[in-house]
Amino acid sequence: VTLPRNSFLNLKLNFNKNIFRAYDVRGLSYKDLSEELVIMLGKALGTKILELGDHSIIIGRDGRNSSPDMYEWLSEGILSTGCNVINVGILPTPILYFSVHKFDLNNGVMITGSHNPAEYNGFKIVINNKTLYGESIQEIKRKVETKIFIEGKGKEEECREAINLYSKELIKDISLPKQLKIGIDCGNGATSVIAERCYKDLGCEVEALYCDLDGNFPNHHPDPSNPENMQDLKKKVLDSSLDLGLAFDGDGDRLGVVNSEGEIIYPDMQMILFSQSILKKNKYSNIVFDVKCSQLLPKIIKDNGGIPIMSRTGHSFIKEKIKEVSAPLGGEMSGHIFFNDRWPGFDDAIYAGARMMEIISKSPLGKDIFKQLPTLSSTPEINIKVGDNEKFSIVEQFKSLANFPESKITDIDGIRVEFNEGWGL
């Protein structure tokens, strides 16, 4: 039996409720993210935008194999409400955020599985200039469940200028007095469409790894937070005597850094350099970081005249806290870095990489600037697999049993325990 195109509106929609997560919608392509579910998600987003008195949304996508289908289904749902769609094509998530800002629009969706395996995909959503998270994502889920949507006929248009406009803005913003030799690893992700060209236009000599789009990620998983995925870049930096190595996750909003000696510079150590640089011109400013960062970071922020502000982990939470306290900089241990001094305050690994190059290029120490960073000993992150329906109750139970004498306990996100000579999360 061939059903009408919108027949599922009259059927009970069964879907995995856990795909509506803390700060995005994410799941297995074609299973969790079925055609019906994604069309309904589009209808919910279009309805929400129209209810706010707006009428257009920008949609971008990464290079995953399922992303074209996700775009077709999502845009179909949005257009069916009367909301217009602007298709900016394949690009990294930061350029989607840049497009929302640059084109003076309020709404955007990035179709991306970020750093997740190839069979996953998802949606990072901006509505009314706010990245959705927490309750605002649950509100969209309720709209999908109730299936009460505005009906109309929106218009679709294409815009392919976003990447060029972004590149011009970045090149205008960054100053590199000394030319650098760098290596980059795009991990076959969305940064493949711009990173190499952009850095060459800045005057860098660039040696590129895996900078061709491939949604199967054949070389390694596009997640620079895992040291295993940084091995090829480390080798390239050492073999070619490069000044710096930069790695990006699948959608380009998380940064990995390797120094000239092949050592990984973790994001909290990156934040030390970024904080020192920014606080030279922005004394007494708030600097936002997440609960996973080293306890040395707030001390160094204070020592350089700044005010450390700890936030929950999650790019949406960091971004919201930056706006709340008017911070020129924010970052988290996963590699999301937010510049809000000369840049519009979204997480952008390509731009953060350029700012790191600027620091090196302007410093008398040059590539040796990383030698001034403190050396720390730490255990690897230990992950215990539990069901989505169990994880929150387990954390709450652990918090209720916590008894750590002579410690400082922070419970804004799980439980962080700080002692005089160490800490744990």
Image: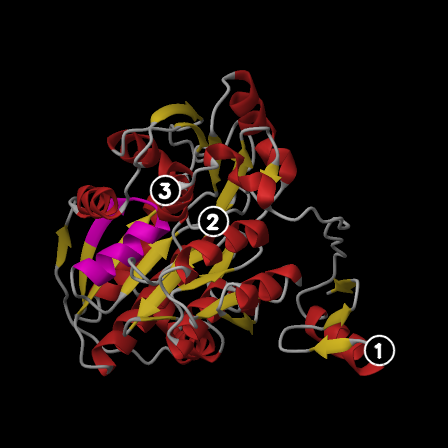
Residue 85 position, x and y percent, is: 19, 60
Spatial CA span between label 2 and label 1: 35 Å
Q: For the view shown, which residue lies furthest in the top direction?
A: 239
- Secondary structure of the residue carrying numbered label 2: loop
Callout 3: helix, strand or loop? helix
Find disc 1 in the rendering and name its residue.
406
Packing grade of label 2 (10 A; few <14, some 14-19, many >=20) is many
Q: Which residue is mark 3?
A: 358
**Magenta region, main secondary structure:** helix
Please tell me which residue is depicted at 47% across the width and 49% down the height of the picture.
254
Residue at the disc numbered 2:
254
Please, what is the three-letter code of the amino acid marked with disc 1?
Glu
Q: Position of residue 248 (x, y in %)?
A: 46, 41
Sequence-first disc among 2 and 1:
2
Q: Amino acid at mark 2?
A: Arg
Could you tell me if residue 222 is visible in this image? no
Q: Are marks 2 and 1 in contact (CB under 8 Å)?
A: no
Task: Indicate whether residue 409 is drawn in magenta.
Answer: no
143 relative position to 231: left or right:
left
How packed mark 3 is, by other alpha carbons closer than 10 Å (few <14, some 14-19, many 20 or more), is many
Q: Magenta stretch?
A: 87-102
Residue 363 in the image: state x and y as whole percent.
42, 41
What is the distance, in whole Å, between disc 3 and disc 1 at their CAs?
A: 42 Å
